[in-house]
Amino acid sequence: MIKKTICCALFLSALMSGIEARADECANMATTLQEIDRKNTQQLAYLLKTCGWPTAPDGNLQASDDVWLLAQHADHDHDFQRHVLGLLEQAVHRGEARGKNLAYLTDRLAIAEGKPQLYGTQLKIDDCKIEVHEIDNRDAVNARRKKIKGMQTLEEYERGAVEVLLPAECREKSK
């Protein structure tokens, strides 16, 4: 699985760099990623049912971050994501998960349900432009973000996303 993950990362990097990829390679890669996500979701559901949310008595939130990341990418199972959101919210209140992760999963589900985001974490790239998926109000979003440790303002987040997500030629156009 590690080899496939590395392959996927290199493939996505090539796409972001403007290297053309064959359509059949894209379809095969998307299918592989979906299969991996489904298997990860099944395994995670079993672990959460059996063991519960990972504890962090020493303050190490790595296991919690890993659980969140797998749930964040379980877009094929919104019921599961909602279940994890409830567990994540409880874990944040206990100090065993990051509020930032709660914001990301909250927004991911909002988009899936056709609702505006509360934190503005989900972005879309269209024609060399990064846009935040629908939000209710920039000032309200920034007020909510300010209450969460480690979250930047929406404007800072957008500027950072341009540097990380856009290919170089797009970044040049946006200057």
Image (tube, rainbow, N blue to C red):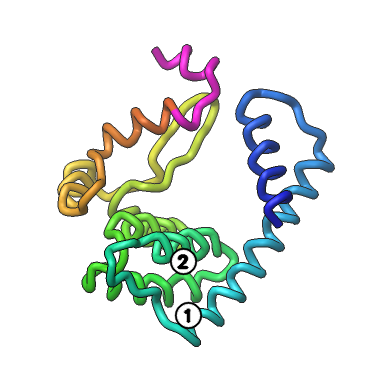
| SS at mark 2 in the image | helix
Per the rendered image, the range of residues in magenta is 164-175
- What type is the residue that disc 2 sits on? Val
Residues at badges 2 and 1 in contact (C-beta under 8 Å)? yes
Say which residue appears at 65% left-offset and 68% top-offset.
Answer: 38
Quarter of the rendering containing residue 76: bottom right
Left or right for 28, reference 41: right
Left or right for 68, reference 102: right
Q: Where residue 120 sits in the image (x, y, percent)?
A: 33, 47
Estimate the spatial distance between the alpha carbons at disc 2 and disc 1, rounded to whole Å: 9 Å
126, above or below 144, in the image: above
Q: Where residue 103 sits in the image (x, y, percent)?
A: 32, 57
Provide the residue designation for mark 1: 48
Give the dominant element type of the magenta stretch: helix, strand or loop: helix
Provide the residue designation for mark 2: 67
Q: Is residue 174 magenta?
A: yes
Q: Is residue 163 magenta?
A: no
Q: Nearer the viewer, residue 158 or 12?
A: 12
| SS at mark 1 in the image | helix
Say which residue appears at 84% left-offset and 42% top-offset.
Answer: 24
